[in-house]
Amino acid sequence: MVRTLELRFSSTAGTTVTLRVPDPKADLTGQLVETAMNGIIAGDVFSSSGGALIGIAGARIVQRETTDLDLI
């Protein structure tokens, strides 16, 4: 199963910007992720078409499972 950490930020343009991190550590906590997100905002290390990242809109871990189908 593929896991992806999605970090969602609000931007100066009023849009939501999502950063995706593949294969996050299994023991992540909300506090650890929030601290990292605040560091990203404070460091102003990413830019987007929606402007600078200015706030936290949320975070989640997405799990995706792929099953191949047998074709005739």
Image (cartoon, rainbow, N blue to C red):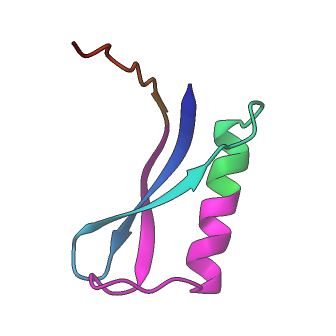
- Residue 54 lies, in percent from the top left, at 43, 76
Residues in magenta? 36-61
| Residue sticking out furthest to the front | 72
Task: Please determine whether, in this image, residue 3 is positioned above or below residue 9.
Answer: above
Task: Please determine whether, in this image, residue 40 is positioned above or below residue 48.
Answer: above
Residue at (38%, 21%) from the top-left corner? 68
Q: Nearer the viewer, residue 16 or 63?
A: 63
- Residue 25 lies, in percent from the top left, at 75, 39
Task: Please determine whether, in this image, residue 48 is positioned above or below residue 39.
Answer: below
Residue at (44%, 86%) from the top-left corner? 47
- Residue 64 lies, in percent from the top left, at 44, 29
Residue at (74%, 31%) from the top-left corner? 26
- Residue 36 lies, in percent from the top left, at 68, 60
Q: Quadrant of residue 53?
A: bottom left
Q: Quadrant of residue 37?
A: bottom right
- Would residue 19 be counted in the magenta stretch? no
Left or right: residue 67 compared with residue 36: left
- Would residue 45 be counted in the magenta stretch? yes
Q: Quadrant of the N terminus?
A: top right
How many numbered marks, from 0 up? 0
Q: Quadrant of the C terminus?
A: top left
Residue at (62%, 52%) from the top-left corner? 34
Q: Nearer the viewer, residue 69 or 40?
A: 69
